[in-house]
Image: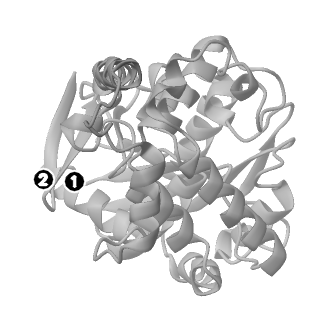
Amino acid sequence: MVKTIDIQGFPHTYELSAPTGSPVVLVFIHGWLLSRAYWQPVIERLSPLYQCLAYDLRGFGESQLDAIKPTNIGTRVETSVAANLAERVTVGASAKSPPSLAWEVETAIAAPTTANYTPAAYAQDLNLLLQQLDIRKVWLIGHSLGGSIALWAADQAPQTIDGVICVNSGGGIYLKEEFERFRTVGKMLVKLRPRWLSYFPLLDLPLARMNVARPLALNWARQRLVDLVAAQPEAALGALLDSTTEAEVHRLPQVVARLQQPVHFIAGANDTMMEPKYVHHLASFHPSFEFCGNNVSEISDCGHLSMVEQPDAVANEIQTVLAKYLG
């Protein structure tokens, strides 16, 4: 059942499966411009064994103001399109059309904000969510940016979080030109996405092939488009910019190095967004790496969306890691 809970004045949407015989709860954290939906194939395979919690990060998926939730985009699009058409056919019309998403992004870029979108801030949101749901024995499973959030959350709450599994997540090396290029492309991606984009025919087709080893089923391509359009501009930009500064990139290995809990990394062998060598680099800061990558596994024929490209392999790897540490 989908529920919403208030965390620091912001609504967070989550789904919690039924309890099982295990005291451990698996908590799934999605990446940038995505949502909790991508974890469902893995959760379906693991929920008979472990209680599973999946939620939308602040400003993404359905964790945002009601007016801009994905379920309400259609209504806004119809209203906006009708208003724009009426304005165009009315000679001398004085009414102004609704602000576009590009305008909202320009505002988000120009206006200073007190909101914090660093991985550490999102980790605080997560730990407060766990407190409010009274979940006390946790393994975190994070994808991409969600992996960084999971590492920070484990650092903040070692008494609650027993272990971390990072999927398509690594880093710790700041390559100036690469990061500047990524930030520029990311800002343009956030800016050039009017809300009606998700209703434009065939635009989901490129997303079926982007950053994956083999084309995704069209329902996942569609989901990527919906989540891309739905993300709150300030959160989308904030999470991008706050997580890719030189200082932030260099903090992550320090976090990994001081974690006492088990940490395991799952890489996609064909991931071009987070290449396996960068996954191995970040993993090497944890004691369990042991000079030979004992805390890293690679999934063949897999790109950056392992949980939907290879859900069986990801679920099996998670079970293997949990069996190793839980007995």
Mark 2 element type: helix
Image coordinates for residue 264, horizontal then vertical, percent:
63, 56
Query: In screen coordinates, is 223 left or right of 212?
Result: left
Mark 1 element type: helix
**Residue carrying label 2:** 132
Is residue 318 shown to the viewer in this render? Answer: yes
Q: Amino acid at mark 1?
A: Leu
Image coordinates for residue 12, horizontal then vertical, percent:
23, 45
* Image quadrant in which you'd find residue 289: bottom right
Image coordinates for residue 37, horizontal then vertical, percent:
45, 28
**Residue carrying label 1:** 129
- Pick out the residue farthest to the front: 92
Q: Residue at x 64, y 54 (%)?
A: 188
* Image quadrant in which you'd find residue 181: bottom right
Image coordinates for residue 84, horizontal then vertical, percent:
38, 26
Q: Are marks 1 and 2 in contact (CB under 8 Å)?
A: yes
Is 6 situated above or below 255?
Answer: above
Q: Residue at x 33, y 19 (%)?
A: 86
Which class describes the residues within 10 Å of circle 1: few (<14), some (14-19), or many (20+)? some
Q: Residue at x 33, y 26 (%)?
A: 80
Q: Amino acid at mark 2?
A: Gln
Marker disc for residue 184:
none
